[in-house]
Structure formats: C-alpha cells, structure tokens
Image (cartoon, rainbow, N blue to C red):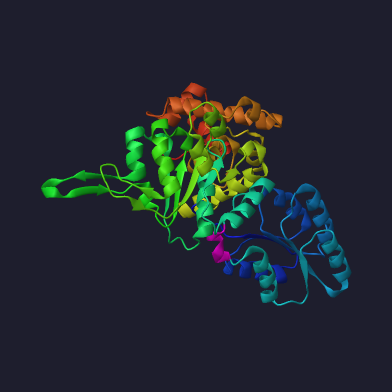
Amino acid sequence: MNVAIRPRLCLIEDDEIVGGPLSERFELEGYACDWFLNGEEALLEMPRRHYDVVVSDIHLPGVSGETLYESLSRKLAPLPPYLFITGYGEIDQAVRLLKRGATDYITKPFEIEALLEKIRGLTGPPDAQGTHAQLGVSPVMRQLEMTLAKLGPAGSNVLITGEQGVGKETLAFALHRQRCPDGSAPFVALNCGAFEERALQTELFGHEKPGLHGAVRLRKGAFELAHGGTLFLDEIGDVPPALQGRLLRAIREREIVRLGGEHRIAVDLRIVCATHRDLKKMVEQGEFREELYFYINVVRLHIPPLRERKEDILWLAQRFLEEDRVRRRGTLKSLSARAERMLLEYLWPGNVRELSSAIERACLLGAQGEVQPEALFEEIPIALSTANQTLDEHLRFFERQYIMRVLSAHERHGRITRAAATLGISRKNLWERMKRLGIPTSGDA
C-alpha cells in the first residue's frame, strides 16, 4: 500500500483520569488509539477491527479484564499482543494471565514512558511502519511477512503466484522495501500482458534510433530503469514464446542490449515475477520455456484468494478507509455492522482489487458517517442482500434499490420531481426517504 498506516492501539480503561492522558499521549507518539471505558464495549468492537497491541486494566466494571481476555481468546485467533495494567493486589492474577498467553503487565503507579517502551518493543517506532510491510492478519499473510524478512537482504529471483487482484504487486513492493527501506533504489513494475511483442521488447530493453545529424535517439527500458533496485514483471506467463529466449538471457546474465543497439549493458537488480497462470502446466504444454521457469522460480511466494483468508477482509477495508481519509483530507468513515457482515459473506471474485474499489465507491457515493452495504456494490447479489437480514432490513434494501433505479432513469432532467411522480409520492416524501435510506441528495432538482 502506498499510505503508511499508524500502528493501532486498543486501550481499555474505565478511569478517565488514567485513560484520558494515556490516549492523548499515544496519539502524540504517532499511534492511533481506540479507548473503551468498559469490557462490554471492547468485547463488541474489537472483533471488527485490527489492533497491533491491546492495553487493558485488569480491574474493570462489569466484564473484568480477565473475563474479557478469556472471551477474546475464544473469538479471535490469534490475539494481538496483550498488556495488562494491574495494581499490587492483582499481580497474582496478572501472572496467571501471562501463563494463559498474555504478553506482559505493568503495575500501578507507572511511568508512561515505561509503558511506551513495552509498546515500542512490540510494534517498533510508529515512524518505521511505512517501511514494514503489513500484508494482513491472517496466518498465511503473517507467514509471508516472516518470509519477506528472510528474503530481504538477498537478491534471489522470486516468483509470486495467485489469482488476479490478490495483491501480487503489493507483495513485490514490500519485498523491495525489505532490501531498500529508505526508498532510494528504484522499483519498476511492468505488466507483460499489456503489450504486443515488439512493444514489449522496447519496454523491457529500450531502444536506440538514429536521429538528425548522426545523433542517437535513446530510450531506456525497464531493465535499465530498475538498475540498483527491483524489476517487477507482472503476468510473466503472457510473454510471447519468441521473446522468452531474450528475456532468459537478460535475467541469467544480467546484461541487456537495446533494440537497434550493439553494446551490452550490465544491470544489477532483483527480478520479481508474478503470474495468475499455471507456469508448470505451460512448460509441459510447450508454451513457456522450462529454463526460464527455473530461473525466475528460485523462491515462490503464493498469495491465496481473499475468500480463503477472510480474517484479512475487515483489516484491509479499514486500511482502505484510512487511505481515503488521507487522500481526501476528510473524516474517517466507519463500517456499519451490516456492511461488515456483507463484506465477510461476499466471495470477492476480484479479490483485494475489488474490495478496494468497493470501499472507494462507498466513500465517494455513500452518505456521511457509517458506510452501509448498499453503497459498497452497484448491485448487491440477491444471495447477499437477503442473507441474515431482518424483515425491516430486507424491505429497506429493496426500497433503496428501487428508488435509486428510478432516480437514475431521471438523471438529466428534474431528478427528484420526476422520480417522485413516477413513484407516486410527493417530492418532500421522496426527499425524506432518500435521507433515511442514505441516498445522496446533493445537486437534485
């Protein structure tokens, strides 16, 4: 992702004299912080959000800190790092919680700096998060992060596989940042499936053409532009067979010759390739060179489709909402409970790319405040629109869909007035229904 996301802390503290200053200090230190005054509220909200660290008082009204931890342990897998705030009389209880998997505890009274030091040890400094690839919270994506850390210093060729839209370029860029955290080296991405053969050769290797008065018109290709950094070749399976031999030589020898040129040019770079196709099967069918396959497949990283790692859906949605807030310099929108449920029920055939588009659409066209499911999709599949809905929710959904279709039919002339006439209700009634159903009312006539 292009936007650095602040580590998010969950603070559960009923004493406002303690919780208020802690929350403010966390924000000043560069963390995002959600502060809950009781265990019941935290138990309701925490499964809907991703947190990097939880800081909780043991002594809470109603649901105690220990009961909350046990409940969350059953609902969330795995739990984020969990720090307890405890009084002297509760140390035995804190030790018991450590044996059950809690991370650490700190005893009242304490210095905020001591608590911050423990948090930094678990998250790293907030300003370092832009260079630390956070790919997801599912076990498979966390494992990929661990693999990236091992691969980072090396320059071995890497092949990333997965369906279209799963985030292969994001993973490639995260691998690049492991090797170059300060961003000084180039990251060049090229979609091999976007060009016909001659144009793809030029994009890869550049060209030299004679100009006026003996001058040479020069254009560098992706290999030269990525010198010292990373070249990401997306959809490598779409490279025409006639070009695969030249590409193999460039990858094997780390040298290229521009089209129309004569001199060999050395390049120092890491090659990361990606595909949604079965290259091994293509090799067997004679559609992809076996030697090229072996050269690009030194290390293979596979990204499962989003439907197989549902733990990442709400985590990604929250990050896309944060990106939208940063991009538009507006307020951060939140997902309604119905929207979250629909996001989790949908199979996402377009994977992360489709989820990103759905969140962007909701931010552009949805009402202010909470994002409702109707704003996420142009047309919600019936199986989703009716699943797990009350009768009121079901009727509200179809009322909104029908009104939006009628409004769309009168988009050009007198939208509100003519739509109201078609629906057989007054203009005022239609306006009130639109507001109640979260249909944008700006620019209407």
Which residue is rendered at x = 65% and y = 41% of the image? 340
Principal SS element in the magenta part?
helix
| Residue at the extreme left of the image, as rendered | 213
Residue 445 in view in this figure: no
Q: Which of these two is toward me, 354 or 253?
A: 253
x and y, in percent, of residue 425 in the image: 52, 26
Q: Which of these two is toward me, 134 or 212?
A: 212
The number of discs equals: 0
Above or below residue 27? Residue 379 is above
Above or below residue 151? Residue 430 is above
**Quadrant including the C terminus:** top left
Q: Is residue 205 left or right of residue 117?
A: left
x and y, in percent, of residue 49 in the image: 66, 50
Q: Which residues are magenta?
A: 126-132
Quadrant of residue 415 in the image? top left
Which residue is rendered at x = 48% and y = 25% of the image? 406
Q: Is residue 107 left or right of residue 258?
A: right
x and y, in percent, of residue 176 in the image: 50, 54
Query: Residue 63 in magenta?
Result: no
Quadrant of residue 297 in the image? top right
Which residue is rendered at x = 70% and y = 67% of the image? 19
Which residue is rendered at x = 35% and y = 33% of the image? 197
Q: Which of these two is toward me, 319 or 412?
A: 319
Above or below residue 305? Residue 73 is below
Q: Which of these two is toward me, 171 or 41?
A: 171
